[in-house]
Image (cartoon, rainbow, N blue to C red):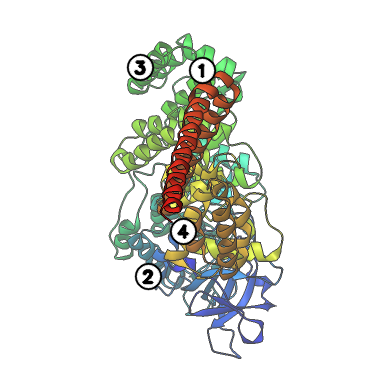
Amino acid sequence: MAYESTSSVLQGGALAVGQRAEILPSVPIPELNSIGGPAFAARMKGVEGSSDLLGILCNTSLPPRLDTVNSMRGVDHVSLLRLIDSGVVAWPDNNRYYAFAFQRPLAPRFKTSIDETHTPMREDTINHYFVTPLIGALQEMQRAGIVHNGIRPTNIFWRPGTAMAPQLNECLSVPGGYGQPVLFETIERGLCPPIGRGVGQHSDDCYALGVTLAMTFLGLNPLQGMDDASILRLKIERGSFAALVGNHRLSASHIEILRGLLSDDARQRWSGNDLDQWLNGRRLTPKNTDTGHRASRHYDFCGKEYWSTRSLAAALPTNVTEAVQIIENGSLEKWLRRAMDDDERANNLVEMLTVISAAGKTANYEEQLVARTCIILDPSGPLRYRGICVMPGGISSMLVETVMSGGSPQILAEIIANQLVAFWVETQQDIKTELVPLGQQFERMKLLIEKTTYGNGIERVIYELNPGLPCLSPIVASQYVVSPRMLLAAFERLAASGNRPPELVDRHLAAFLIVRDQRSELLFEAIAAPESDPRRGIGILTLLSEMQYRYGPDSTPALAQWIAPMLEPAIQRFLGKALKEKLRQLMREAVQRGDLSAMLQLADDPRRIERDKQDFTAARMLYLNIQKEIALCESKIQNKELVVRSIGKPMAASISTFLAIIMVFAAILRAVWQAIMGSM
């Protein structure tokens, strides 16, 4: 993938950003800083003396939207900063960060603050030079499947009074929705913390464009001075269009587009196609919906009056005990039927209560009951559970932020395990079909959370839900590893630095490789074995040697030296002393070459292991036979009578026979001698 590129230091201190651009760390541009990090001058690679590009360094703890990079490369529109290239850069502070190189904006920021005022412009002027180009940019992103999540006046480059088209700033350096003020978010997204909003949908960008246009048409921020809670309360009570436009006088054309874009019902909100029709002069009238339907009688909860299901849903989690009482005693159901005239929601509430009660009062029963009730009351709203307010699409980024900040992901894990996302999908109406994949994805996440083996659990869920996330393992956190092909080089740098972590593989690395490199879970079960188990060192070496073969580099001597001590239990498996010494010598030579495959062949060669076993078996049999002979001899020596019978008698007979033969032979010699002497 394109975002896997790593940097090299070029002439003049420039750092390569991908294959086409380079960033200049010595030339900051503070006025163009982004939410995701500082801005620096950049240029096309090899074009010295130029700095016509904009570099953004993502040096915050928040991961950029790397899964959107490839889609953004295909977007080319006059009102969007064009992405030139991206990649990991080795910054002068000895850390590695992700960086983007964009087309440099042609104008200053339209506004430096959302409260900044300007003189309202003529309708035809603003429509031609501002509205039309931005609608084109929105349509282009819709075609590419990109949600910007950052449309606002302070994120637009434009110089009023010129024919130059406005340009939307980048949207890749932070998770979707992060950094966007509540004013520009829909009600449901605004109820969530920025990290819990998620990427959202095209309709969310349309809403943000509507707020931006309202401020531009009016020349001011109509809700200036209000805090986030007050803005949300006003939107819920009056609706976004009434809250923002109020009694301000605008042309009929502008009222029409704002009413369409600021609809609080995403099903009725204008899309890029509707905006295109508006540009062509076709008049569209947004339909009325029950999103802000007001009850005929208020509902009293904890001493406050609530006139809509959305406002009540936002209040229930503030007092779970009281909320459980009104749910279980049926008073909420009666209010839905009588005051809201909403039998469908009432029936859904009764059905949900029956199902959850039949399952028994398990752990966090009350929190689950309130969370599901809030979903029924406010289907398009966020998930509200144990103090957390998050959109289903924001769970992924909230998990990352929680883990990176050292927090506990327990509550988010419970949201997944309790299948609240699936229940949220079921309650949606017109867009349920589009959300089915989301529900299925979280059903699978539930199964992964319940698996406690190495590389599974919450760690694996994090990487499954965040396709472009770098490895969060503390072992390689400073190396910004976004792809398995970058891992071995990162290990080599760590090993060469002398600052080696105590472990080479942890649960995060295992989960990262299972998801990104399709590694077998069985391999990591071996790696999770104790240090004295030969499987651990062999498992680690098997993993890394395969990566060296597939991705390189071909030589990693520092990493090999780091791994070598882990292979001693594997060497100890061999039974021959001379063989072990020979293997250690060959291993030292392979370490010097940085050849992980050779090391694996030495430590885990099945044929060598089998020969060693055969040699040991043969030696053992020989030893046993010798021991048997020695034992037999010793037992015979200890029994003297047996020795006499079995050895003495035969020996005496042999000696007697021998002596008799000698005597007979002597007698014959004597007779022969006498015969010879007599004849003479």
Q: Residue at 48% across / 69% down in the picture? A: 122
Q: Secondary structure at mark 4?
A: helix
Q: Position of residue 318 (x, y in %)?
A: 60, 25
**Disc 4 residue type (three-letter):** Gln
Screen quadrant of the C terminus: bottom left
Residue 521 visible in this rendered orientation of the protein: yes
Q: Tell me which numbered mark, 4 or 2, is placed earlier along the sequence.
A: 2
Q: Is residue 578 above or below residue 49?
A: above
Q: Looking at the image, is mark 4 or mark 3 nearer the viewer?
A: 4
Tell me how far mark 4 sits from mark 3, CA to CA.
62 Å
Q: Position of residue 58 (x, y in %)?
A: 60, 63
Q: Tell me which numbered mark, 1 or 2, is placed earlier along the sequence.
A: 2
Image-quadrant location for residue 633: top right
Residue indicated by mark 3: 351
Residue indicated by mark 4: 601
**Disc 3 residue type (three-letter):** Glu
Q: Residue at 60% across / 83% down in the picture? A: 10
Residue 204 visible in this rendered orientation of the protein: no
Tags 1 and 4 touching, CB below 8 Å = no
**Disc 2 residue type (three-letter):** Gly
Tell me how far mark 4 sits from mark 2, CA to CA.
46 Å
Residue indicated by mark 2: 74
Q: Tell me which numbered mark, 3 or 2, is placed earlier along the sequence.
A: 2
Q: Tell me which numbered mark, 4 or 3, is placed earlier along the sequence.
A: 3
Q: Is residue 258 left or right of residue 503?
A: left
Residue indicated by mark 1: 365
